[in-house]
Image: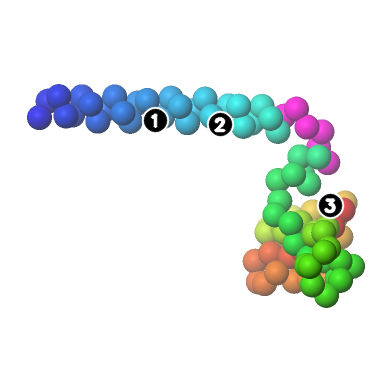
Amino acid sequence: MNRLIILVFAAVLFTVATADRYFDDYNQEYDDLSGDESMAKRGVSCLCTSDGPNTRGNTLSGTVWMKAPGYSNNGCPTGWKFCGKSRGFFSDCCKQ
């Protein structure tokens, strides 16, 4: 039983150490980008009204933003505009 406890403890310690290293590399990747690039890269793409009625053959030019305090009424951050497709109660599609 003692060996099992030691083995589980070692596995948890290894997992935490690996996750810490992973997130350090992940954060370094975003620190290398300028502000606008990191803002655009962090979101999920969405369909704006200027993209057309469907996604077939079109690129998704918008970015989904969660509505949060401090943003405008539509949920888009400063420098971004609402592109006409509401994504529901918690998020909107915004375009730079």
**Which quadrant would residue 38 be assigned to in this image?**
top right
Foreground mark, 1 or 3, reads: 1
Which residue type carries mark 3?
Thr
Q: Is residue 83 visible to us here?
A: no
Is 40 a magenta residue? no
Q: Are marks 2 and 3 in contact (CB under 8 Å)?
A: no
Give the residue number, with chain letter if any, for mark 2. Answer: 23
**Please, what secondary structure does the residue beneath circle 3 have?**
loop
Residue 17 can be seen in this image: yes
Q: Please name the residue that numbered disc 1 is placed on.
A: 15
First in sequence, mark 2 or 3: give its number. Answer: 2
Circles 2 and 1, Cβ within 8 Å, touching? The answer is no
Label ID, residue 68: none
Please report the bounds of the magenta region as a residue range: 31-36
Q: In terms of depth relative to the viewer, which is nearer, 54 or 57?
A: 57
Q: Position of residue 50 (x, y in %)?
A: 89, 67
Give the CA separation, mark 1 to mark 3.
38 Å
Mark 1 or mark 3: whose residue is earlier in sequence? 1
